[in-house]
Image: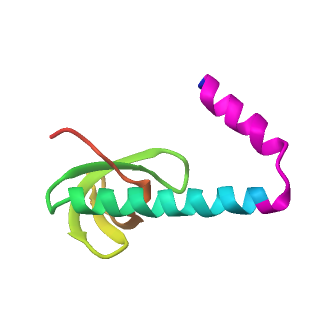
Amino acid sequence: MSPELKEAISLIRNMDAAEIAMILEVAVDQKTFLGKQTLRSLITGDLVEFKGRTGGMITGTVIKVSRKNVVVEAALGGEKWRVPATMLTKLAA
């Protein structure tokens, strides 16, 4: 854990409810921004990785990019997953 993250956690622990609500709003906005940024960077055929339901990492190929989710075909087994863009990491081809 970085020193900056430790400091942020320490500051949050000393905030009141209104300040925490503001922090949550900013965090949600940032997560939405990052998801949209990821969506814009993905095209069909890209290699991506995400954490599956069991906690293991799943690698696959982008089949379709929608407004919020991406359909990914797993490299092993060929399963198709509908994954939120915020959960994806684009891998080098």
| 26 sits left or right of 85 in the view | right
Q: Residue furthest top?
A: 3
- The residue located at (63%, 33%) in the rendering is 5
Q: Choose between 71 and 38: the one closer to the eye.
A: 38
Q: How is the image coloured?
A: rainbow
Q: Residue furthest bottom?
A: 67
Q: Is residue 1 visible?
A: no
Q: Is residue 21 magenta?
A: no
Quarter of the N terminus within the rendering = top right
Instruction: Assign the magenta stretch its main secondary structure.
Output: helix
Q: Position of residue 37 (x, y in %)?
A: 31, 58
Relative to 59, does residue 85 appear above or below in the rendering? below
- The part of the chain drawn in magenta is 3-18
Q: Position of residue 88 (x, y in %)?
A: 37, 53
Q: Is residue 63 visible?
A: yes
Quarter-of-image position of residue 11: top right
| 41 sits left or right of 81 in the view | left
